[in-house]
Amino acid sequence: MNIIKVKNYKELSMQAAGIVAAQISRKKNTVLGLPTGQTPLGMYQELIKRFRKGEIDFSQVITFNLDEYYGLSPEHPQSYNYYMWQTFFNNINIKKENVFIPDGVTKDVQKECRYYESLIEKKGGIDLQFLGIGDNGHIGFNEPAIALNSKTHLVNLSQATIEANSRFFNDIEDVPRKALTMGMGTIMKAKQIILLASGMKKAPAIAKTINGKVNTEVPASLLQLHRDVTIIVDKDAARDV
């Protein structure tokens, strides 16, 4: 693991955006794995700035999102599809046909999961996978468990995750109880992985990810087994490292 400690969230976002820019410069049709949430928002904003300055061309880039709430349509304001288009894709020159996000309202979950896996393989696999981390050590929506599903699948969200995500909804009862997510095996197949973490709330999970034993109760700890992982943390998230 390569650990990059930065002063603050702004510096974290700049570092992350720089990695994306360098990757696309090397490979125009880069396949990116992208997360949602508050942590990557600064990275997306910085990438938009660089695009508007003419520094990055997304016209050949392909993206796969980590996950999507099950039961929310793409138009729902809290769906990850909506998030990605509003915060990032609508502001760059990426082609709609190159954007892939799990279908949260699919009528055949198993078929959708198999289809998503096949799409990733068809595009040559993920070159650069970005991840956030949950307070309980989950990545994507791979929650702590005795065993983890390796491929894209439907997962029951933990109460801790539901409570953490309730700040984005009017009421905790509105938070979906299930989600479609890439599995740990799918994530680990990425050629390069970048994990971003900011704030003191993430410090315990980051400490377990970097220094703890590899176990499914801390899904992010499995990243210790990947050949090319970089963890970018601000000083608060790095408190216990």
Image (spheres, rainbow, N blue to C red):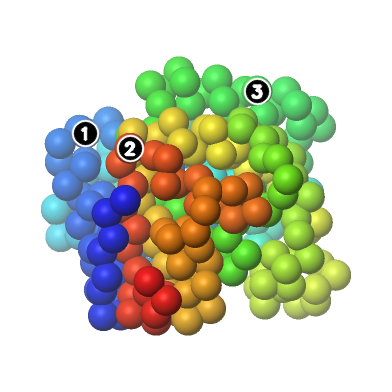
Which part of the image, by quadrant, shows the C terminus? bottom left
Per the image, the residue denoted by label 2 is: 227
Disc 2 to disc 3, C-alpha distance: 26 Å
Residue at (34% x, 58% y) in the render: 231
Which amino acid lies under the numbered mark 3 shown in the image of this protein? Arg
- Whether residue 43 sits left or right of residue 179 in the image: it is left
State the SS at label 3: helix
Disc 3 to disc 1, C-alpha distance: 27 Å
Per the image, the residue denoted by label 1 is: 28
Which amino acid lies under the numbered mark 2 shown in the image of this protein? Arg
- Whether residue 59 sits left or right of residue 88 in the image: it is left
State the SS at label 2: loop
Foreground mark, 2 or 3, reads 2
Q: Position of residue 42 (x, y in %)?
A: 36, 69
Q: Are marks 3 and 1 in contact (CB under 8 Å)?
A: no
Quick one: which residue is furthest to the right in this view?
173
Label count reads 3
Which amino acid lies under the numbered mark 1 shown in the image of this protein? Lys
